[in-house]
Image: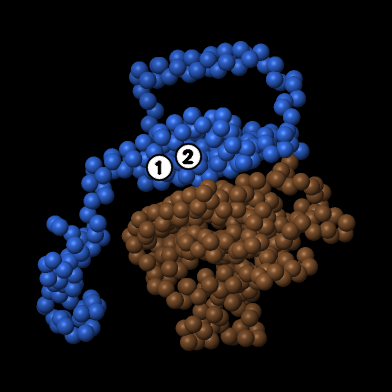
Amino acid sequence: MSAVLFFIAAIGAITGAVGVVMLRNPFYSVLALVGHLISLAALFLLLRAEFVAAAQVVVYAGAVMVLYVFVVAYVGGADEPLHSPGGALRALAPLFALAVAVELCIALLGTGLTAINSRGAHYVFGFGTPRQIGQEFLTTFLFPFEVASLLLLMSAVGAVVLARRRRGLEGTDEFEDRFAAVPRPAFTGTMAEGAGIRGGAGTTSRPAAQERPLGVSSGDPR
Amino acid sequence: MTLTAAVDYFEPWWVQLVKALLIFGVIFAVLPMIIIYERKLLGRFQGRYGPNRVGPYGLMQPLAEIVKFAVKEPFRPTTSVGFLYRVAPMVAILTAVASLALIPYGDVQHIFGQKVGLYGIDVSVGPLYVFAFGGISFYGIMLGGWASGSKYAFLGAMRGAAQLISYEVSQGLALVGVLITAGTLSVTGIVHAQAGMWYFIPQFAGFLIFMTASFAETNRAPFDLVEADSEIVGYFTEYGGTAFVAYLFAEYTNMIVVSGLATTLFLGGWLLPFGIHPPGWVDPFVVLAKMFLVLTFFIWVRATLPRLRYDQLMSFGWKILLPLATLNLLVTAVLVVR
């Protein structure tokens, strides 16, 4: 049973990985990567690493890839398949691919492939549970854990700083500023018209937001 | 290969199969009841009768609607991507139904000399299981909107997906307070840890944040602008007939999952107050009754609160709910460690 599941998950993982690089449409590539990550989570589950599997799905498939999907869906539509690279890149690409393949072969064969014939480690009750992983993080691997969290914090702060520099976060009442001042033709059903405050043919009625006295408005210094 | 590594007993495969079918069957049968209950109750809130034509007291209304949806012509827009257009509602249903497995309806019971846990699964990762499927359910919405090949559906999907991932963060953080108070991730363990006091009292802020985020997660009022009548765009704009019902079904199932989670994590699961210990077969009914109360609360809020604008929705999620959830987590952690 576990062998069948292993092969299903392994085939899913490899197909997904191949799909990422082979598919022309970037949206399908991202979807293939999602399939690949979910297959990897299934493989983790077969290894009894439940927490790693759940984290894989929550963090990668559920959060990181979500941003990829957002960006690709907005920017690269289905109509614009990726262009093939030309010239030097096309000539160099096989060389680099070959180098990576040789490296992988050296790494794989360097192990002597001794693990294939062994039965693998025994399952200890509680292995792969959040409790055990948490204990390891806070005792054996405390330093790498803290360094990694510091790195994440730095990148989070950096992202906010970069977004702010482009004036993305300034102007709190952006919505009101943009839409409230638009002149509105008469008889478009504003509440002021309904109450008879303004209206009638020919008058250019404006929404109430414009007629507020200065200083009472939203508190924006501009 | 089962997901029950945290359980110290073994269930044969047929018990697991029966449990899976039973949970699915009961929830599937309860869904139309929830729909008619919601419409009746909404009617009463708004000073009208609600549906009252089909069957006695209009109780057969959901049946009539299902027939109506089922006999509609299955169409798809010419600009849509056929395969993904069909797969997307399935993803939505699959993730919603899979999440159902986590809700515990009772402790381990002896049934016909067999130890049976009255829950689908009790994984060591606990609520993370639901969040994993919640993460995948994003693709149900996103693919549905994208594959429809319509700008309105696409924009609706973007809004819906953004809302989903924004409030998922607060929802998760609100749960962590419960988890560190209970000291376990197992859902049955969390219920047992509430024997002295249900967690909605010590974790009241967490409970409020969780419920608020859950309203947004399940696209319920006041955060229902993904699908509200007055908003013309939604990710299922181009869907009709059974595919549309699939989305509707997933949505109500998600509602049940969330009310089950709230029952389990905050309202004491199958425990009763005042030290009442009924026999084991009562437990599932206690859980269902509590879930029913939470669902009633969902409907009540829908009838009471006005809908938020989209920018208000986003700034509420990120600028108010998330800091509150973080603060709640911090205070809980300090109090527990002390």
Disc nearer the start of the sequence (2/1): 2
Rendered residue at 50%/87% (across/down): B48
Indicate the secondary structure of the residue bearing disc 2: helix
Q: Position of residue A190 (x, y in %)?
A: 23, 77
Q: Quadrant of residue B285?
A: bottom right
Chain B on-screen colour: brown
Residue for badge 2: A30
Q: Position of residue B288 (x, y in %)?
A: 66, 68
Indicate the secondary structure of the residue bearing disc 1: helix
**Is B328 in front, or is B50?**
B328
Quadrant of the snapshot with the N terminus of chain A: top right
Is label 2 on the same chain as label 1? yes
Quadrant of the snapshot with the C terminus of chain A: bottom left
- Depicted B154 relative to depicted A41: above or below: below
- Depicted A171 relative to depicted A122: above or below: below
Rendered residue at 47%/73% (across/down): B302
Q: Position of residue A164 (x, y in %)?
A: 26, 44
Assess disc 1: are there few (<14), some (14-19) or many (≥20) residues with their C-alpha within 10 Å of its C-alpha: some
**Is B234 in front, or is B330?**
B330
Residue for badge 1: A72
Q: Is residue B176 left or right of residue B275?
A: left
Q: Position of residue B40 (x, y in %)?
A: 56, 81
**Is B227 in front, or is B128?**
B128
Judge whether residue A165 can be spotted in this image: yes
Query: Which chain does the blue colour mark?
Result: A
Q: Residues at badges 2 and 1 in contact (C-beta under 8 Å)?
A: yes
> Which chain letter goes with mark 1?
A
